[in-house]
Amino acid sequence: MTLSSLFWIFSVGFLVWYWWKAKAIKDFVLGVAKNHCKKMDVMLLDDVVYLRGLWFKRDRNGSMRVWRRFLFDFTSTGEERYLGRIIMLGQTIEQIELEPHRYEREY
């Protein structure tokens, strides 16, 4: 086995591992978004979250962690789309934010 072969095996293995971990994190964040939308009495649209930011930042203890920003769409009335954000640092949800939206109470 040559060094070139080992490099390609390692590269493919790393890509598969990264894809698997990223999918697990995205599924976790989707569950968090669903629960938060239900709690806030709005509806998650399209049943999906989008990764829109990836960076390295330090946590409260000074350890370097992966910072991720996920976006999702929701509605409160069934007519307009609004944007929601979930910020994750490492394995911890740091912030969940919903854009200002109309709220119509059913009587």
Image (cartoon, rainbow, N blue to C red):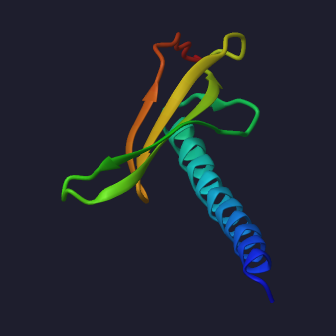
User: From the image, which quarter does the C terminus lie in?
Assistant: top right
Res 76 seen here: no
79 sits left or right of 62 in the view: right
Vertical placement of residue 27 versus 1, above or below = above
11 sits left or right of 71 in the view: right
Measured as percent of width and height from the top left, residue 70 is found at 55, 37
User: From the image, which quarter does the N terminus lie in?
Assistant: bottom right
Res 1 seen here: yes
How many tags in the picture? 0
Residue drawn at x 54%, y 30% is 41
Give the quadrant of residue 81.
top right
Residue drawn at x 52%, y 14% is 103
Of residue 61 and residue 97, the one placed in the foreground of this image is 61
Measured as percent of width and height from the top left, residue 66 is found at 43, 52
Vertical placement of residue 65 versus 73, above or below = below
| Residue at far bottom of view | 1
Measured as percent of width and height from the top left, residue 35 is found at 55, 46
Of residue 64 and residue 31, the one placed in the foreground of this image is 64
